[in-house]
Image: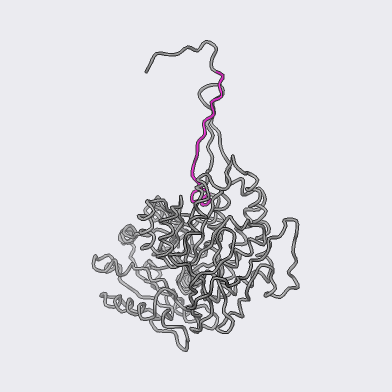
């Protein structure tokens, strides 16, 4: 950590370009990208990356800079200008300047809907360029280590999302409706209305996709957001902000802050945003819901389940999907497969042995397994040992620290792990909370149920608190009907190819069963999270010619 003097000159962001100006990056090297202030592969202890704040249209530093360790080797490699509690006033003032009716709405500055369609067009094109795509993919890998394909997937989803909202598609989000009234001249019109000043808080595991999609959704609907991304990975979104400015985003439309949780909580209490979107842990989500008096939308933790039905098919494919769902991104997805309920018919197949073989293929060298950023190795092994004390439990595979690594001890380094726990033991009051504790890492529970034990499985699901994703792997329509009809998970995949992870931009992703639940990615999600309903009843008349004042009522 080091301090900088107040007069320090900060690098200016990339200049905004006129909308008529197009660009060709085919011959440029990555470090000359017109918006970028760093090169992902050059970030190191000798050439650290720097992450700034954006407030009231200006990039700024702070009085204290925190240093991040490279999650792969422990080298100090990124410096973050973290805003302290005494430095939040400019951010509070910036949000306070935005009125409740937003920066635009159907009756105010409607040309801004078109502006954001154009910004989306430019940004989608930029992310489609190989050099830009590779820049963000490698930057994601540097701070949230995952395989190149997994990191690239984030960039591709973000690019497709932006394509989905090019041209007139932003104003279509604000489409209204009208209903005939009771007499001539009366009509009621329903509109989608922004909240005005809002906040977005997102986690480390998807440094680009989650904040970018939620940010653009907030902007499309006319809100003025302050964006806080987990400081461990905020360098990715800082560079994305610079790309958006390059594509025409007005610099005053978004504030970007780096801070610890305590400082952000203080800012929220003082700025009093009309709505806050939080993606992250259930503990923080519940605190924010109380502090902000319910003005929140939440996508919190997910202990996500998968059920293999009685019809056994395509064992190779199903085992591969199980491996991807549980261990891609080292299990650090809110949609990761946390527990597998396996029908007894699958026990006589090679499913578990194939899952073990697939897990054994994962290696640190290509980041198909890597650092766990929120659990230490010791914490995960301690949890494993507690599970193994449950009668009938056994280690299926994994359960060891990664070999020959230099991951710093503040993070975790665990081989992909699976623990078998008997279904009857899971349901016992003394075990249930232990077994269903979410370990945000390469860790899953496996159990088996018999033909007549589906009600026990459904009982286990009913007792869970988080209802994000789920998978029912079966092509038996009656089995699917039974399971789907008795569960609530907001994003549920059903059929032989069902999975729990890998949500693209073309369908809703979010929890269900909670009025505070947030979605992401689709028009329905954007309208639900980032706007409210406003009804305007027009009543022009005329007043009937023979009208008289009626008796009092």
Residue at x-position 68% and y-position 63%: 15
Q: How is the image coloured?
A: one colour
Q: Is residue 307 visible?
A: no
Given residues 360 and 452, the one toward you in this image is 360
Q: Position of residue 298 (x, y in %)?
A: 43, 56
The residue range painted magenta reads 524-542
Q: Quadrant of residue 177?
A: top right
Q: Position of residue 35 (x, y in %)?
A: 66, 67
Give the farthest residue toward the top. 546
Q: Position of residue 431 (x, y in %)?
A: 26, 69
Given residues 123 and 42, the one toward you in this image is 42
Give the farthest residue toward the bottom. 404
Residue at x-position 76% and y-position 73%: 27
Q: Position of residue 28 (x, y in %)?
A: 73, 73
Number of numbered discs: 0
Indicate yes or no whether the magenta region holds residue 527.
yes
Given residues 84 and 305, the one toward you in this image is 84
Q: Quadrant of residue 505?
A: bottom right
Residue at x-position 47% and y-position 69%: 325
Q: Is residue 339 above or below residue 160?
A: below
Q: Is residue 347 above or below residue 55?
A: below
Query: The C terminus is located in which quarter?
Result: top left
Residue 427 located left or right of residue 228: left
Q: Is residue 102 visible?
A: yes
Q: Quadrant of residue 187?
A: top right
Residue 42 located left or right of residue 488: right
Indicate yes or no whether the magenta region holds residue 84.
no
């Amino acid at each position: 950590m080091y301090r900088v003097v107040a007069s320090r000159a900060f690098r200016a962001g990339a200049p905004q370009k006129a909308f008529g100006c197009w660009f060709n990056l085919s011959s440029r090297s990555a470090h000359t990208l017109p918006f970028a202030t760093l090169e992902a592969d050059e970030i190191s202890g000798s050439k650290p990356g720097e992450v700034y704040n954006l407030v009231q249209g200006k990039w700024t530093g702070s009085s204290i800079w925190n240093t991040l360790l490279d999650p792969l080797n422990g080298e100090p490699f990124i410096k973050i200008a973290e805003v302290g509690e005494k430095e939040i006033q400019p951010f509070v003032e910036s949000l306070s300047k935005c009125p409740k009716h937003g920066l635009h709405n159907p009756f105010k500055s409607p040309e801004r809907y078109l502006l954001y369609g154009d910004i989306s067009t430019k940004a989608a094109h930029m992310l489609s360029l190989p050099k830009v795509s590779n820049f963000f993919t490698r930057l994601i890998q540097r701070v949230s280590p995952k395989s190149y394909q997994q990191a690239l997937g984030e960039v591709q989803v973000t690019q497709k999302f932006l394509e989905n909202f090019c041209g007139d598609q932003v104003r279509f989000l604000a489409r209204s409706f009208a209903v005939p009234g009771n007499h001539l001249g009366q009509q009621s019109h329903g509109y989608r209305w922004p909240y005005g000043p809002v906040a977005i808080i997102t986690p480390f595991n998807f440094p680009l996709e989650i904040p970018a999609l939620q940010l653009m959704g907030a902007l499309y609907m006319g809100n003025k957001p302050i964006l806080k991304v987990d400081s461990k990975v905020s360098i990715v979104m800082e560079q994305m902000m610079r790309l958006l400015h390059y594509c025409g985003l007005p610099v005053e439309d978004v504030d970007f802050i780096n801070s610890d949780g305590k400082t952000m909580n203080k800012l929220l209490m003082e700025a009093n945003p009309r709505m806050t979107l939080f993606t992250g842990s259930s503990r923080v989500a519940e605190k924010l819901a109380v502090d902000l008096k319910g003005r929140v939308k939440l996508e919190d933790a997910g202990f996500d389940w998968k059920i293999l039905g009685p019809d056994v098919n395509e064992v190779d494919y199903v085992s591969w999907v199980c491996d991807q769902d549980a261990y891609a991104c080292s299990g650090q997805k809110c949609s990761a497969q946390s527990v597998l309920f396996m029908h007894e018919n699958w026990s006589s197949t090679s499913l578990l042995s194939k899952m073990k073989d697939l897990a054994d293929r994962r290696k640190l060298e290509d980041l198909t397994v890597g650092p766990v950023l929120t659990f230490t190795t010791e914490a995960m092994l301690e949890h494993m040992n507690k599970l193994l004390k449950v009668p009938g439990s056994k280690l299926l595979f994994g359960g060891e620290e990664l070999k020959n690594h230099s991951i710093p001890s503040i993070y975790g380094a665990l081989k992909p792990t699976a623990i078998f726990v008997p279904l009857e033991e899971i349901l016992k009051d003394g075990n249930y909370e232990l077994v269903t504790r979410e370990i945000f890492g390469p860790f899953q529970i496996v159990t088996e149920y018999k033909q007549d034990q589906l009600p026990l499985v459904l009982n286990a699901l009913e007792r869970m608190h988080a209802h994000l994703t789920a998978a029912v792997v079966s092509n038996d329509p009656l089995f699917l009907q039974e399971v789907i009809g008795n569960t609530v998970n907001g994003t549920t995949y059903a059929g032989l190819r069902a999975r729990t992870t890998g949500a693209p931009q073309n369908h809703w992703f979010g929890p269900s069963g909670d009025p505070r639940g947030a979605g992401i990615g689709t028009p329905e999600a954007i309208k639900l999270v980032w706007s409210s309903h406003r009804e305007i009843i027009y009543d022009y008349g005329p007043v009937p010619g023979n009208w008289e004042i009626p008796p009092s009522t």
